[in-house]
Amino acid sequence: MLMVLLALVSCRHDDEIFIPENVTMSKPELSDIKGFYLLNEGNMGSNKSTLDYYDYTTGVYTRNIYGNANPSVPKELGDVGNDIAVYGTKLYAVINCSNKIEVMDMATAKRVGQINIPNCRYIKFHDGYAYVTSYAGPVEINPDYEQKGYVAKVDTASFTVVDTCVVGFQPDELEIVDDRIYVANSGGYMVPNYENTLSVIDIATFKEVERVPIAINLQCVVGDEYGGLWVSTRGDYYEEESALFCYDVRKKRIETKLDVPVSSMWLDGDMLYVVSIAWSNITMSDEVTYAVIDVRTHEVLTRNFITDGTEKKIKKPYGVAVNPITKDIYVTDAKNYVNPGTLYCFGQDGALKWSVRTGDIPAHFAFIGK
């Protein structure tokens, strides 16, 4: 028996047990925003994606709220949390390498359903349906990769996939503008043979109607109220650098290219907030950016919205979000990608208000209202 116990202890030596933990970070804030969920990706293959929650009404930050709300779910949230969003009264977490979307009650984070989609990536909603990008094939770096990706159409009442539309290779983020779905095809598994197009899907027919060349290895895409679609490229980490494009969906042309590297971005009104840590295989160094772009004028207002020097503490800026009412700015630090990260809260003036430890690779935000 002693030998068995020793063996069990040694097997658990490298595992981290996630215990729910509440931390009071600030005074309560009373507004139409009740709180936000933060999805921690967790390192691929580690099955350590977790969900945190910050409650504005109490000022309390709670780590691993999913595990606490769903103690009977095997493997908890799963492997690599890639996106999160609220629709109606439900919270949807896209769990990439677990090939599923966890559907939870927005108020309690209790599981109410599961949607099975292979290698799923990002999610958007329109008229009762969820639209989800999928790499479709296995996780595999192969310049001759043969499996194109697709967008799945999901009925949010039954949690079932009702249709699919084939797009380019390894589609990442998507945006819905004027009854069209715009999909950023990356071709990321096919290095150096990256994709370079946006797929355009007509929602009514759910058919791809156009491919728009933008740049290689596309990633993020968000639409503004002026018909601009802001699309980022990761580049190839050599000569082709990460950059940001504005494609006008009405004029059907690229209006602007900005030499602003992008890892994550968040649109708040006319202000597009960008964080990035862009690696170069030529200089063997990172370029760090905390930019704000005015989407009306296409002007880069600043390349560092942090004003008090806190950026010197941030090792790997990874995610960004903005409270639509208070305008507080949230930046996540993935640190070394294998240990708990940090969430930083900055005021509208760019000064640090508070920071808190998160799960591994904190990345994706979803605000909820009362």
Image (spheres, rainbow, N blue to C red):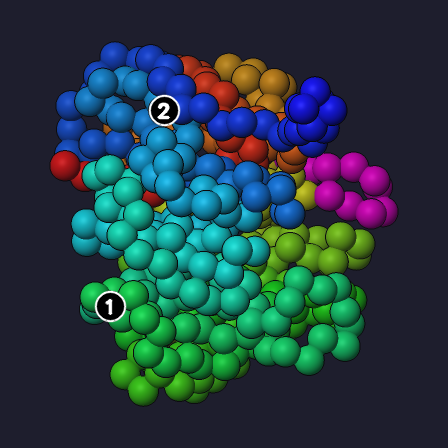
Q: Quadrant of residue 248?
A: bottom left
Answer whether residue 204 is visible to the viewer in this image. Answer: yes
Residue 135 in the figure: left or right of residue 176: right
Q: CA distance from mark 2 to mark 1?
A: 30 Å
The verdict on residue 153 being magenta is: no
Residue 171, image x and y in percent? Answer: 54, 67
The verdict on residue 282 being magenta is: yes
Q: Quadrant of residue 202?
A: bottom left
Tell me the residue at 74%/24% (across/down): 3
Q: Quadrant of residue 155?
A: bottom left
User: Circle 2 is placed at which residue position?
Assistant: 62
Label 2 environment density (alpha carbons within 10 Å; few <14, some 14–19, many ≥20): some
Above-or-below relation of 338 to 168: above
User: Circle 1 is placed at which residue position?
Assistant: 158
Residue 310, image x and y in percent? Answer: 55, 17
Above-or-below relation of 291 to 299: above
Residue 343, image x and y in percent? Answer: 47, 26
- Magenta span covers which residues? 279-288
Q: Nearer the viewer, mark 2 or mark 1?
A: 1
